[in-house]
Image (tube, grey):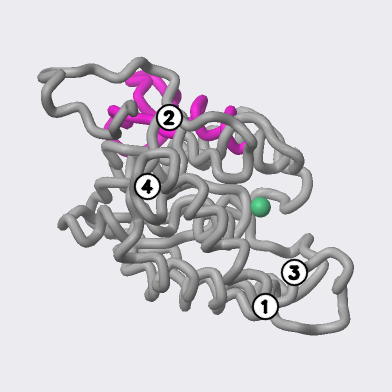
Amino acid sequence: MTGLIDSPSIDILAIAAHRDDVEQTCGGTLLVQQALGWRTGILDLTRGEGGTRGSAAEREAEANAAAKILHVAHREALDLPDGSLQNTLENRLKIAAVLRRLRPRVVILPYWQGRHPDHYTSATLGYEACFAAGLAKLDLPGEPHRPYKILYASLYADVRPSFVVDITPHMETRLQALLAYRSQYGNQPEGSGLFVPEEDIRERTFASARHYGLLAGVRYAEPFVQKEVSLAGDLMLLPVASI
Ligand SMILES: [Zn+2]
C-alpha cells in the first residue's frame, strides 16, 4: 500500500500533514468518490515520528488499515519532519514528484489556517507543489502535470464552507477508518489529557458531520473551501433549499 512505484494514475488525491488527518477531515468524501467509480489516493507528508503516542511503524500499520477501510487505490507517506513541516523548495519538489507520478485531477489539501502549524503549512506547501509539478522546465523526473482542481478540507477550521459533500451512506465506515488509529484513540494513560477517549470519538465525529449536513439539508456531510467561484449551468438544478 505504501510507496508503489508503478502505480497507475489517481483521480482524487488527498494530501495532509499527518497520518489520520485525511480520515478526520475528508475520509467520507473519499468513500463517496470511490463509490462513484473514481480512483482515490492519500499522500501523508510525515510519518508520525513526532507524535505523543505510537511509533512511526505503528502508525504506518494503522494508516494501511485505514486505507483499506477507505478503499483508496494508493497511499504513501513522505519523510518530511513531523512537527516542523517547512515550505521549502526541497519539500515542494518531493510532493511535485508524487503529483507527476499519480497525476490527480483533484487534490484535497488542509485548510490554510488552523491551530497546528503542520496543517496550515501543508496547505501552502501543497498548493505550491501543485504549481511546480506543472512547470515544464522543472528539474524533476516525469511529465509535467498540474491538478485541475484544488480543494481545501476545512473541518478543522471554523470557517463557512464553499460546499459540503453528503457522506450519509458512508458515515459508519468513515468512523471505522478513524478508529483504525488505535495508538491515537485507544483509552490509554499516556497523553490522556491531550487525546480523546475512544467513546467520545464517535460522538464528535457524528456531531461534526451532522452540523455540516444541516447546512445543506442532508444528514451527514464534510465541508470544503474552494478559492474559485462556483459556475452554474441551470438555475433550476441548484441544490440546497433557501427557505
Ligand atoms: Zn494533523
What residue is drawn where x is 74% and y is 64%?
Answer: 49
Closer to the chain start, of discs 4 and 3, is 4
Label at residue 13: 4
Residue 71 in sight: yes
Q: Secondary structure at mark 4?
A: strand
Q: Give the CA separation, mark 1 to mark 3.
A: 6 Å
Residue position for label 2: 130
Relative placement, left or right, of 80 versus 100 is right
Quarter of image, res 132: top left
Q: Are marks 1 and 3 in contact (CB under 8 Å)?
A: yes
63 to 149, vertically: above or below? below
Q: Give the CA separation, mark 3 to mark 2.
A: 34 Å
Q: Amino acid at mark 2?
A: Cys
Crowdedness of circle 2 by 10 Å Cα count: few (<14), some, many (20+)?
many
Residue position for label 3: 196
Q: Nearer the observer, disc 2 or disc 4?
A: 4
Q: Give the CA separation, mark 2 to mark 4.
A: 11 Å
Relative placement, left or right, of 101 versus 172 is left
Q: Secondary structure at mark 2?
A: helix
Which span is picked out in magenta?
A: 122-151
Q: Amino acid at mark 1?
A: Glu
* Residue 6 pos. (x, y %): 28, 59
Residue 1 in sight: no
What residue is drawn where x is 42% and y is 26%?
Answer: 226
Q: Are marks 3 and 2 in contact (CB under 8 Å)?
A: no
